[in-house]
């Protein structure tokens, strides 16, 4: 029997942090304009948007992973498959342990991004496995569609291959039109299959980059300045 493959975007922001679109708008866009079967909502330091998206997902035929992009002292970490919100500002080691304690999967997002808080800049990925223990990330975001410099993604992909860590692709979308521009290809269909594929190292990171051009920047600034950015705005 031939294996069926699906795609997931494991890195999306909503109005619950600094995204432009509400969870409902994200789901409607994914259903209408992409072939993604699974998305992870990964707002900065909050999971309210992810929980809301998971509640609404059935109406849209999309499966949602509750995630969070946690701001640790040493850079961003993506927590996937979590149920409890993780606090910002802790040492990365504590955050990794807290993700694992609730059965989550810890991903190093944009690990070598130079213009974003990334753990690679602090040398922490060297400790992910091997000589320096204590940062057992489970996977690497080997393609992040928001990074300006292609070499930053190249370094992440090489790192993942070198350490034999699962490679994931995410859009880091803050706008509807960039959702799915980075994605993860995996055998199977839904959330459970993706989780299994990540743990088995069977995922492939794919995509093409987007840029913070004047249009996206203006939309983002308008959304940020136009209301209370930490709260969902009217759809
Ligand atoms: Zn980030
Ligand atoms: Zn992000």
Image (tube, rainbow, N blue to C red):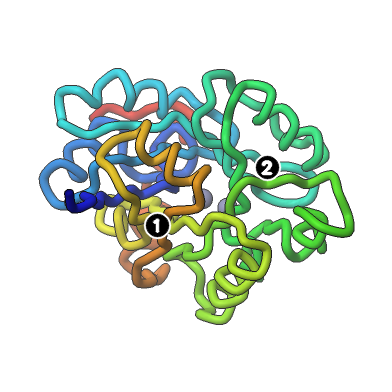
Q: Which residue appears at 42% of the width and 68% of the height? A: 212
Q: Can residue 224 be seen in this snapshot?
A: no
Q: Nearer the viewer, mark 2 or mark 1?
A: 1
Tag 1's secondary structure? loop
The C terminus appears in which quarter of the rendering? top left
Ligand 1 within 8 Å of the CB at mark 2? no
Task: Tell me the element at label 2.
Answer: strand
Residue at the (32%, 27%) spot, across then down: 53
Residue named by callout 2 = 71
Closer to the camera in the image, 173 or 228 = 173
Numbered badge on residue 216: none
Q: Which mark is residue 171?
A: 1
Across and down, in percent, residue 119 comes to 72, 56
From the viewer's perspective, is residue 15 above or below residue 9?
above
* Residue 72 x/y as whole percent: 74, 42
Q: Position of residue 19 (x, y in %)?
A: 41, 44
Query: Is residue 112 or residue 211 the one in the foreground?
Result: 112
Residue drawn at (53%, 26%), measured in percent from left and top?
82
The response on whether ligand 2 sits within 8 Å of label 1 is no
């Amino acid at each position: 029997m031939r294996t069926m493959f699906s795609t997931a975007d494991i890195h999306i922001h909503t109005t619950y942090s600094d995204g432009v679109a509400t969870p409902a708008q994200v789901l409607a866009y994914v259903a209408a304009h992409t072939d993604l079967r699974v998305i992870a909502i990964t707002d900065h330091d909050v999971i309210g948007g992810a929980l809301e998206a998971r509640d609404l997902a059935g109406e849209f035929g999309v499966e949602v992973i509750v995630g969070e992009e946690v701001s640790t002292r040493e850079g961003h970490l993506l927590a996937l498959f979590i149920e409890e919100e993780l606090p910002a500002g802790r040492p990365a080691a504590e955050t990794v342990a807290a993700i694992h304690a609730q059965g989550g999967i810890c991903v190093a997002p944009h690990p070598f991004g130079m213009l974003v808080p990334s753990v690679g800049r602090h040398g922490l990925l060297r400790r992910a496995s091997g000589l320096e223990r204590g940062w057992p990330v489970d996977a690497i975001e080997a393609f992040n569609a928001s990074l300006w410099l292609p070499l930053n993604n190249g370094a992440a992909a090489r790192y993942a291959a070198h350490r034999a860590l699962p490679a994931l692709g995410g859009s880091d979308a803050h706008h509807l039109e960039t959702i799915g521009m980075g994605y993860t290809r995996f055998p199977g269909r839904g959330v459970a299959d993706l989780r299994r594929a990540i743990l088995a190292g069977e995922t492939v990171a794919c995509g093409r980059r987007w840029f913070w051009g004047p249009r996206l920047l203006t939309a983002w600034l308008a959304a940020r300045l136009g209301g209370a950015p930490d709260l969902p705005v009217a759809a």
